[in-house]
Amino acid sequence: MDVEKDFANDTIRNRNIFDYLLLKSSENAAKLLKLIYFSEAVKANADPVLMRLFVLLEYGFDCSTEGEIRLALKSGADPKKIIFAHTIKVRKALKYASSVGVDLMTFDCKEELLKINQDFPTARLILRLKSESKKSVYNLNKKFGCDLSEVENLLLRAKNLNLNVVGVSFHVGALCESSETFVSAIENSRLVFSLAERHGFKFTILDIGSGFFGSKEKESFFYELTQEIKTSLEKNFPTEDIEIIAEPGCYCVASAFSLVTSIIGKKSIAQNGNNGLQKEYYLNDGFYGSFPYFYKDYDVKHVPLLKNKDRVKPIIETSTVAGAQMNNSAVADEEQTIALQ
Ligand SMILES: Cc1ncc(COP(=O)(O)O)c(C=O)c1O
């Protein structure tokens, strides 16, 4: 395994696309956050080469479906380093998790406790707490997590069922620019740890979710954020011997790939009687492919193929870029002014 790991690291280091990823994910972030382990969110990118890379880097995996667990295991993941992090699980998936020893999972309601009690009563459970989603592009807390006010009842219910609750998780929402949101979620988690202790539970895991950006432009913010998180962890969990997990998705994979699409055709549209003043460019990709309607919210970096010096004489035209589908809404971007030769 060590030989394989060295080989993979050497090979990967020589490939530009992974340099940045490795630098950020393994050295920088792990040091800054002093986390016990990172659990890469498979939903962010399930590419088999990336998954294998994360196994070699000894990351864990945050899986939300049976399919993702299967993929992680196929990539060589240790079942003990997989967290089944969907709070509402398909029963068949619960049984599958039980059969392969993936026993760490989240819940946020009593109904899920009843399901787990029937299908996997020995699982180690993490209570997902709602957090604020201030300054996050995607709020995951409308759908997932319980309120602080519900925690005690849920703990009592778990106790009644003799279930093993071992920790707390939260997710501040994807692409979060507020360190206060993390700090407040850590403080709430502290309250839950204390409450659990009063009810006889011994909590050992705090899962701080994610919400980290993946682009280089946000690296200084990431640095500041990790300092705030570290300080808050030290303040709220000064003595406990606890395992801290983060589940970065975008952070780990945003820089790993470049998307290239082709222009498969173009049209010159007559505008005010002048032919050729407006152009339509048709791509072989679109909203139903790599450009979902929210793609502009992500910290995607546009890389021009032609450098300025190579452009002999740029012509600026008002243009429309259209997606691939036979559908009016499959327009990748309307009324973009682009410089093309
Ligand atoms: C439970 C959980 N963990 C981790 C992630 C990854 O989050 P991010 O993309 O902010 O890194 C998500 C994203 O939806 C999630 O739902």
Image (cartoon, rainbow, N blue to C red):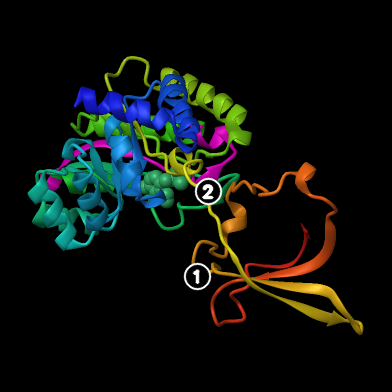
Label 2 sits on a secondary structure element that is loop
Q: Which quarter of the rendering shows the C terminus? A: bottom right
Residue drawn 46% across the image and 57% down it:
142
- Determine the image quadrant of residue 220: top right
Q: What number is the disc on residue 21?
A: none
Task: Pick the residue in front: 78 or 151.
Answer: 78
Segment colored magenta: 160-182
Residue 182, can we see it? Answer: yes
Would you name the residue on which mark 1 appears?
A: 288
Question: Is residue 196 one of those drawn in magenta?
Answer: no
**Mark 2 belongs to which amino acid?**
Ser
Residue 90 drawn above or below residue 206:
below
Q: What number is the disc on residue 258?
A: 2
Picture coordinates of residue 189 (x, y %)?
38, 34
Picture coordinates of residue 336 (x, y %)?
75, 63
Of callouts 2 and 1, which one flags the residue occurring earlier in the amino acid sequence? 2
Residue 274 drawn above or below residue 103:
below
Q: Which quarter of the rendering shows the N terminus? A: top left
Q: Going by the image, does 135 lie left or right of 243?
A: right
Residue lying furthest bottom: 273
Task: Pick the residue in front: 13 or 310.
Answer: 310
Q: Going by the image, does 228 lie left or right of 201?
A: right
Residue 41 drawn above or below residue 57:
below
Task: Pick the residue in front: 195 or 306.
Answer: 306
> Disc 2 and disc 1: Cα gap in Å?
18 Å
